[in-house]
């Protein structure tokens, strides 16, 4: 039920992204360019032709939607992916929502309705981490989504314990990024803060998976 609802919301978001892009495309003069990349200050520093820049994110979101249907067929543990439907639906929806919010910023800046948004990247990534962290513990063992180390893939109990732990780590990491987005942190430090927080959360989760695996095997 939740999976179907999440898919409908994704389709609605993708349609809204595409329609907004088409509407802006018709408003702009021929040969116009739109922002497609932003620096640490939230200023546009990369541009593309309107036909590409306004539809790149909707196409990416559509590809993500197609990938959801293909992955269970390709993954050797596809049945576990199907059993993780609710958790995966939350993750896919969170990523699609992030893409939709970035598309909204591109549309607004293309029309001159919005200026730089230096806090937006950190806030969006923090929110994504919180969403993902809340459902990581519900993922079943698979080869495509989650903390896929040799140790979690070797032992389902290690997978479950690692993902419950990693879920808490990523929620904390997300809340930290949200808090930093509201702090006087200099904009030029934000990219480093996002990357550092993500890498630290991933590294701690990977190390935890190895420690749990060693413990399962009676190691020290």
Image: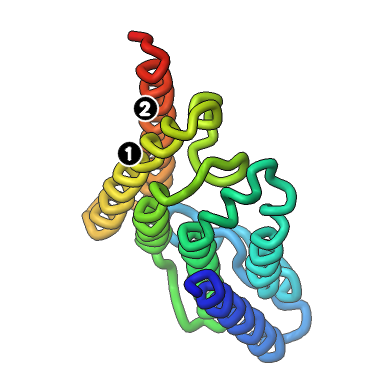
Q: Residue at x 46, y 63 (%)?
A: 90
**Disc 1 + disc 2, Cβ < 8 Å:** yes
- The answer to whether residue 106 shows anywhere in this view is no
- Disc count in the image? 2
Task: Judge by depth and name the residue closer to the eye, 197 or 207.
Answer: 207
Disc number at residue 81? none
Vertical order, 87 against 195 (above or below): below
Q: Residue at x 24, y 60 (%)?
A: 182
Dot 1: element: helix
Residue 135 at x, y percent in the picture: 40, 54
Task: Judge by depth and name the residue closer to the eye, 165 or 72.
Answer: 72
- The answer to whether residue 1 shows anywhere in this view is yes
Q: Residue at x 67, y 64 (%)?
A: 60
Mark 1, Cα crowd under 10 Å, few <14 / some 14-19 / many 20+, is some
Vertical order, 6 against 210 (above or below): below
Residue highlighted by disc 2: 208
Q: Residue at x 45, y 78 (%)?
A: 114
**Colouring convention used in this rendered image of the protein:** rainbow
Residue highlighted by disc 1: 165
Left or right position of 7 against 113: right
Left or right position of 170 against 91: left
Occupied quadrant, residue 121: bottom left
Left or right position of 7 against 63: left
Residue 165 at x, y percent in the picture: 32, 39
Task: Judge by depth and name the residue closer to the eye, 36 or 196.
Answer: 196
Vertical order, 19 against 46 (above or below): below
Question: In terms of sequence position, does the residue under pointer 1 or pointer 2 come before the other?
Answer: 1
């Amino acid at each position: 039920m939740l999976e179907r609802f999440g898919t409908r919301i994704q389709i609605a978001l993708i349609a809204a992204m595409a329609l907004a892009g088409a509407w802006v495309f018709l408003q702009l003069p021929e040969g116009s360019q739109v922002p497609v990349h932003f620096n640490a200050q939230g200023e546009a520093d990369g541009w593309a032709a309107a036909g590409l820049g306004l539809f790149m994110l909707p196409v990416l979101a559509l590809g993500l939607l197609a990938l959801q249907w293909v992955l269970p067929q390709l993954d050797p543990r596809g049945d576990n992916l199907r059993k993780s439907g609710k958790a995966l639906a939350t993750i896919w929806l969170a990523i699609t929502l992030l893409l939709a919010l970035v598309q909204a910023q591109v549309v607004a800046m293309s029309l001159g309705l919005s200026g730089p948004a230096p806090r937006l990247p950190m806030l969006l990534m923090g929110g994504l981490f919180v969403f993902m962290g809340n459902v990581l513990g519900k993922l079943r063992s698979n080869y495509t989504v989650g903390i896929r180390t040799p140790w979690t893939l070797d032992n389902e109990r290690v997978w479950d314990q690692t993902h419950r732990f990693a879920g808490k780590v990523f929620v904390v990491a997300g809340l930290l990024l949200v808090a930093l987005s509201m702090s006087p942190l200099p904009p030029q430090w934000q990219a480093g803060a996002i990357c550092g927080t993500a890498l630290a959360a991933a590294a701690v989760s990977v190390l935890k998976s190895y420690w749990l695996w060693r413990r399962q095997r009676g190691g020290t």
